[in-house]
Amino acid sequence: MKIKTRQEQIEFLKNLKDEDIDYEDHPEVTEEFFKIMQAREPNKKGVFIKLDTELISFFKNHSKHYQTKINDVLRAYKHAFEKRKIAH
C-alpha cells in the first residue's frame, strides 16, 4: 500500500497493530540506554528544528525540562548508532 497524503499516513498509523511494527533497526531500551540519557555534556549549542506537534506535547507532558529530555534521547540514539551501526 503506497501512502500518499499526510491524512493517509495518520490513518495507516492509527490502524497499525503492535505486532505489525518492525523494531529490527531500533536500539533495545535497556538500563544502559537510560544511563546514557542521564549523561550531560556542558558544551551545548542552540539550534532551531521543527518537530511534530505530538512529539513536543509528549516531552512537555513528561518533563518540565523537555528540551533536555529530547537531547538525552538523541544522545542515546547516537550512542546506539555508533555502538551497533543501526540504520539511519
Image (cartoon, rainbow, N blue to C red):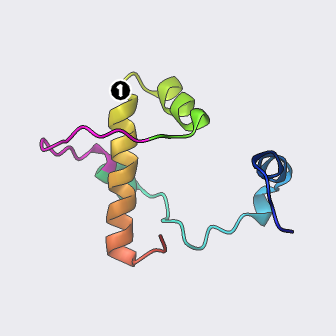
- Amino acid type, callout 1: His
Whether residue 17 sits left or right of residue 84 in the image: it is right
The spot of residue 15 in percent (x, y) is: 86, 51
Q: Badge 1 is on which residue?
A: 65
**Within the magenta stretch, is there residue 44?**
yes
Query: What secondary structure is marked by label 1?
Result: loop
Prevalent SS, magenta region = loop
> In the image, residue 78 lies at what x, y percent?
34, 62
Q: Residue furthest left?
A: 42
Residue at image location 84% in from the left, 47% down from the top:
11
Toward the bottom, the furthest residue is 85
Could you tell me which residue is drawn at 58 percent across and 33 percent down? 53
State which quadrant residue 33 falls in: bottom left
Relative to residue 7, is residue 24 drawn left or right?
left
Q: Viewer-proximal residue, 46 or 37?
A: 46
Where is 4 relative to 52, above or below? below
Q: Is residue 15 left or right of residue 49?
A: right
**Residue 16, image x and y in percent?**
82, 55
In the picture, the quarter occupied by the N terminus is bottom right
- Residue at 47% over, 70% down: 88
Q: Position of residue 59 (x, y in %)?
A: 49, 32
Range of magenta residues: 37-49
Above or below — where is 66 with respect to 41? above
